[in-house]
Image: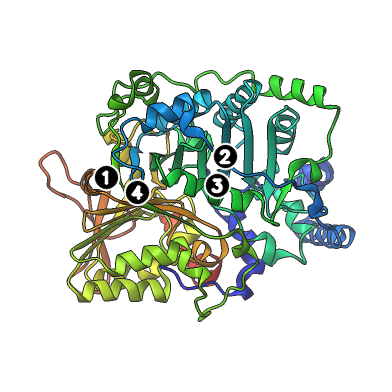
């Protein structure tokens, strides 16, 4: 849905992460002046400080510009363990399978139910656990899950953890300590070779390699015994599971069993054994013998009180917590059995050229974006999407234009400026709003205030709800759940993972959740009578009426709107 990003903008992409307040995937803050050279730096004039920082970056570049990644010989090959159907988890989840070609699914719309499901999979695994995430934050949620993985390894379970290296500056020590346990291996995707103490120093020491280090693994996947999986949009951090006092995200995962799981495992193995992956021990020097590292990990993760919360009796779809249903047996799981496909970008995508007009190769036809576009273009009656980061680009607009030309209804829910955790991406999206409305797209923007007040998707922090789920429903028969945004970065820079579930039941469930969000948690956009300005209609009240009309971005201050007006013309779309 996005135009390929041009490589010329890649040098500036690191700055995007420092401009944006992105709690779920945010970069660590740039080093403060007092951290760089002591408190005396605070007194330097701005010009001198800028010169100092420039010299520092240059010096770091000279010192580490020739830094190289370790030899690839340090990564032994390993693959998924077969025979998971004979485990207790396998026998439970596969008991109700109608045949060998059909997979079972259960949506996880509520964050705390989704964390509980992950905990239960880890707790019940007997042979293997594979974990692949863009972000595992060093916070209460991250430590809770990592400690559960450590406990599984003590039971003799093989644990493989694959994390993208972009946001590991604060968690290197934690992950290294975890890797000191037997049966656990931690690897990092597309790592930085030096300057690992902060994101600033990582980029400073990779100044001649920015094209590579800007390409990231955005996949989110957890596999247990090669028979059960959780995939979707959530990373592992407080904000995804409503343990962040300032912000929480509306997202979606899916619990999956059956033949779709070995396919997902094969994608994990492709990444795990790829040349872009390195064991953490080859990148981070050990600060002590293994026994000392294990003691350190135990101390760091001992306190995770409040993470495993008491859950409601059922979620939005009437499902009980997964652990209760696993205890009760296959019938209690109420899985939806359907045909499905999984698609993943290849790890080599981070090495592929990216430029406008690049011709498709055979490998592109197996990517997530290609297949989302393929199915959307084939829609017969309706396409409904939630996309938190929406910058369609020329090719995405052409897809929507073609669908609308056949009178297919098209609706999108995305973040409003007030809900946007990445305002610069919102600036890119704004360029397409009027064009989308003129094509007849029903466009909705999330209201953080009304979403929080409704409490339909859980309890939100002070900033209210923010959208992070990447969902597509086609003709109420096909559902997509995955990690891919409709922006240039997902198009040509990051690797993504997604599931297509060919089930009217699953599609209707997602459609109903999105419809509820549209009505009571989102502004409906329209063009004013002059067809030149956008108006926002407030979410529906208890009588189903949108009573207020706003002529500026709602729930924002004048300064927030002015700042975006000033920055928007300066931001190339290719860096978004």
Q: CA distance from mark 4 to mark 2?
A: 38 Å
Give coordinates of residue 62: x percent, y percent.
Answer: 88, 62
Regarding mark 4 in the picture, which secondary structure is present there?
Answer: loop
Disc number lying in front (3 or 1): 1
Residue named by callout 1? 506
Disc number lying in front (4 or 3): 3
Residue named by callout 2? 131
Direction from residue 492 to residue 281 in the image, left or right: right
Regarding mark 3 in the picture, which secondary structure is present there?
Answer: loop
First along the sequence among labels 1 and 4? 1
Give coordinates of residue 189: x percent, y percent.
Answer: 66, 51
106 vs 508: above or below: above
163 vs 414: above or below: above
Direction from residue 223 to residue 8 in the image, left or right: right
Query: Which mark, residue 105?
Result: none
Q: CA distance from mark 3 to mark 1?
A: 28 Å
Query: Which mark, residue 555?
Result: 4
512 vs 561: above or below: above
Disc number lying in front (4 or 2): 2
Rate crowding at label 4 as few (under 14), some (14 to 19) or many (20 or more) other CA atoms within 10 Å.
few
Check contact, mark 2 vs mark 1: CB within 8 A.
Answer: no
Residue 372 location, quadrant: bottom left
Disc number lying in front (1 or 4): 1
First along the sequence among labels 3 and 1? 3
Residue named by callout 3? 25
Regarding mark 2 in the picture, which secondary structure is present there?
Answer: strand
First along the sequence among labels 2 and 1? 2
Q: CA distance from mark 2 to mark 1?
A: 25 Å
Q: Decide which of 198, 54 is in the foreground and name it.
A: 198
First along the sequence among labels 2 and 3? 3
């Amino acid at each position: 849905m996005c135009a390929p990003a041009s490589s010329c903008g890649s040098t500036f992409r690191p700055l995007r992460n420092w401009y944006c307040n992105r709690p779920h995937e945010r970069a660590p803050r740039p080093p403060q002046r007092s951290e760089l050279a002591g408190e005396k730096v605070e007194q330097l004039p701005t010009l001198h400080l800028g010169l100092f920082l420039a010299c520092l970056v240059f010096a770091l570049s000279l010192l580490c510009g020739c830094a190289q990644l370790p030899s690839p010989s340090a990564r032994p090959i390993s693959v998924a363990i077969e025979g998971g159907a004979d485990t207790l988890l396998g026998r439970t989840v596969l008991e109700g399978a109608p045949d060998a070609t059909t997979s079972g699914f259960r949506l996880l719309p509520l964050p705390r139910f989704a964390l509980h499901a992950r905990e239960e999979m880890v707790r019940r695994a007997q042979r293997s656990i594979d974990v692949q995430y863009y972000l595992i934050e060093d916070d209460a949620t991250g430590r809770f899950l990592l400690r559960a993985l450590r406990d599984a390894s003590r039971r003799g379970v093989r644990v493989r953890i694959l994390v993208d290296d972009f946001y590991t500056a604060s968690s290197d020590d934690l992950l290294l300590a975890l890797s000191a346990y037997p049966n656990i291996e931690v690897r990092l995707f597309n790592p930085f070779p030096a300057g690992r103490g902060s994101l600033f120093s990582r980029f400073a020491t990779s100044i001649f390699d920015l094209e590579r280090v800007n390409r990231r693994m955005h996949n989110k996947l957890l596999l247990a015994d090669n028979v059960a999986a959780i995939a979707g949009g959530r990373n592992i951090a407080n904000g995804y599971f409503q343990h962040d006092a300032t912000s929480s995200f509306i997202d979606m995962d899916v619990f999956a069993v059956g033949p779709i799981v070995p396919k997902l495992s094969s994608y994990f193995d492709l990444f795990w054994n790829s040349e872009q992956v390195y064991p953490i021990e080859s990148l981070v020097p050990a600060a002590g013998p293994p026994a000392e590292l294990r003691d350190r990990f135990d101390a760091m993760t001992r306190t995770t009180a409040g993470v495993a919360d008491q859950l409601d009796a059922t979620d939005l779809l009437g499902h009980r917590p997964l652990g209760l249903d696993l205890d009760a047996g296959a019938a209690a799981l109420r899985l939806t059995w359907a045909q499905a496909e999984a698609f993943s970008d290849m790890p080599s995508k981070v090495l592929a050229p990216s430029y406008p007009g690049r011709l498709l190769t055979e490998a592109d036809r197996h990517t997530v974006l290609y297949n989302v576009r393929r199915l959307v273009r084939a829609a017969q009656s309706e396409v409904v999407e939630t996309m938190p980061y929406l910058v369609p680009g020329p090719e995405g607009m052409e897809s929507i234009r073609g669908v609308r030309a056949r009178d297919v209804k098209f609706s999108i829910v995305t973040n409003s400026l007030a809900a946007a955790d990445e305002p610069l991406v919102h600036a890119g999206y704004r360029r397409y709003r009027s064009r989308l409305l003129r094509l007849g797209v029903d466009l909705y923007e999330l209201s953080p205030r009304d979403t929080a007040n409704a409490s339909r998707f859980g309890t939100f922090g002070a900033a209210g709800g923010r959208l992070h789920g990447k969902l597509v429903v086609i003709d109420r028969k096909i559902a997509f759940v995955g990690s891919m945004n409709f922006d240039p970065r997902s198009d040509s820079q990051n690797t993504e993972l997604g599931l297509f579930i060919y089930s009217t039941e699953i599609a209707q469930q997602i459609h109903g959740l999105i419809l509820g969000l549209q009505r009571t948690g989102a502004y409906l956009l329209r063009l004013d009578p002059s067809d030149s300005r956008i108006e926002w209609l407030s979410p529906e009240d208890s009588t189903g009426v949108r009573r207020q009309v706003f002529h500026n971005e709602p729930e924002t201050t004048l300064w927030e709107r002015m700042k975006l007006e000033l920055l928007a013309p300066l931001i190339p779309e290719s860096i978004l």
